Amino acid sequence: MPDEPTQQTYRTLIPLFDELRGERVLVRPYRLEDAEALRAAVDESREHLRPWLPFADAHQTIEESRDWIAHRMADWLLRGDFGMTIWELASGRYLGGIGLHPRDWTIRYFEIGFWLRASAEGHGYVTEAARLVIDFAARGLGANRLEIRCDARNTRSAAVAERLGFTREAELRNNMRAPDGSLRTTLVYGLTPADPAWPRTRE
Amino acid sequence: MNQPSEPPQYVTEIPLFAELRGPRVLLRPYREDDAPALFAAIEESREHLRPFLPWERFHQTVADSRDWIVRMRAQWLLRGQLTVGIWEAATGRYLGGSSYHPPDWDARTFEIGYWLRASAEGHGYMSEAVRLLVDYAFDQLAANRVCITCDARNTRSAAVARRLGFHLEGRLRNHMWSTEGQPRDRLIFALIPDDPRYPSAR
């Protein structure tokens, strides 16, 4: 069992972070001034997002993006859901989003979701960002289980989970609808403290 | 694939059954006057339920059980959690309970949960009852998926799923917290419309 940093009386007092830095990417919570970067990244990526994610047609205006960000900021404060941005450190370019979604606080089980703007694919940015988030979930939130779910047809997402050392635990047939309304098979990947890829305590 | 002729506009309009009958069991939604029988069955079964089901401790008096029945009746009206009691058809003896967890009415996916009173175990009542609910889901509710999940240590529960031909789709590690406060693995079993139902059923 990892350290127990989340034994707080109030969930809103669980310590979070301002930013996480990797070698090439920076991960931090959303700010209202990210709205234009977010809108532009979604706008360039609609066709690329559409098969897998429900927001391919969202973020049509900067106001819509600001409203969406305000909700993510409120979720962050309430520790209800942790939506974050991914930036390229060298250039300051906005790359995409990554989320840590609490599924069960009793066992401290979180799902990780992510997307990348179309022009930033293929450089391993999501893998690097996910490692930072996994590290925070394990050490900062005392997670006992992390999960990545994706459509079985989404081979790029599945490859990220496998690259991160997650184990494919289940294939759920017809368990939900894809954005086009078709029934999909969902792959479930899990990572637990027993796995080699689980973050080790710092020396 | 099952397609309902014209899906109702409101989920509260989705038709449901008044009762389901098998050779030996009868399933129907609870009525408030079932509270004493339900409470007595829980009383006799606490040790047997406690390792896997968290709710026995919420039934400390007959009034607790009656309150729960009222809330389940409301859930039935709203097409949320759909809970039935199970009775032995011949004697009218109360045997246990089963539910469709709140369905995803858009994707038409269902999960079934169940429990049997301690003294009714080992006669195949549960397999018969769950089979009625599986058939109703596919044949009347146009289910695209019916699943059963349980603690990996709950071999009796898993045996019901296996006996009905459910496929083991996976084992999610540390996915649930046991009633004793330990992380537990969860088994997920499912049937979809193309699967042969009950290939091994007796």
Image (tube, grey):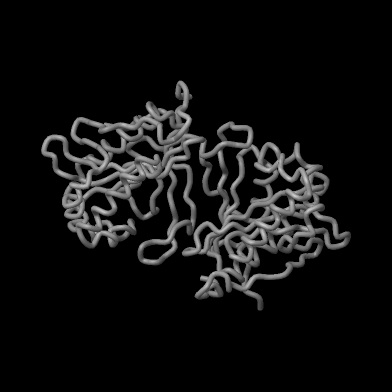
Mark yes or no: residue B167 visible: no
Q: Is residue A26 above or below residue A172?
A: below
Q: Quadrant of residue B101?
A: top left
Residue at image position (61%, 44%) is: A150
Horizontal relation, residue A75 to residue A107: left or right = right
Residue at image position (44%, 40%) is: B103
Q: Quadrant of residue B142?
A: top left
- Give the percent coordinates (x, y) of residue B46: 23, 59
Residue at image position (25%, 43%) is: B30
Q: Quadrant of the C terminus of chain A?
A: bottom right
Q: Quadrant of residue B111?
A: top left
Horizontal relation, residue A104 to residue B198: left or right = right
Mark yes or no: residue A184 visible: yes
- Give the percent coordinates (x, y) of residue A118: 79, 44
In-front residue for pair A149/B111? B111
- Give the percent coordinates (x, y) of residue B69: 27, 49
The furthest residue to the front: A63
Q: Is residue B17 above or below residue A149?
A: above
In-front residue for pair B117/B183? B117
- Give the percent coordinates (x, y) of residue A89: 84, 62
Horizontal relation, residue B154 to residue A25: left or right = left
In-front residue for pair B197/B8? B8
The furthest residue to the right: A91
Horizontal relation, residue A42 to residue A150: left or right = right
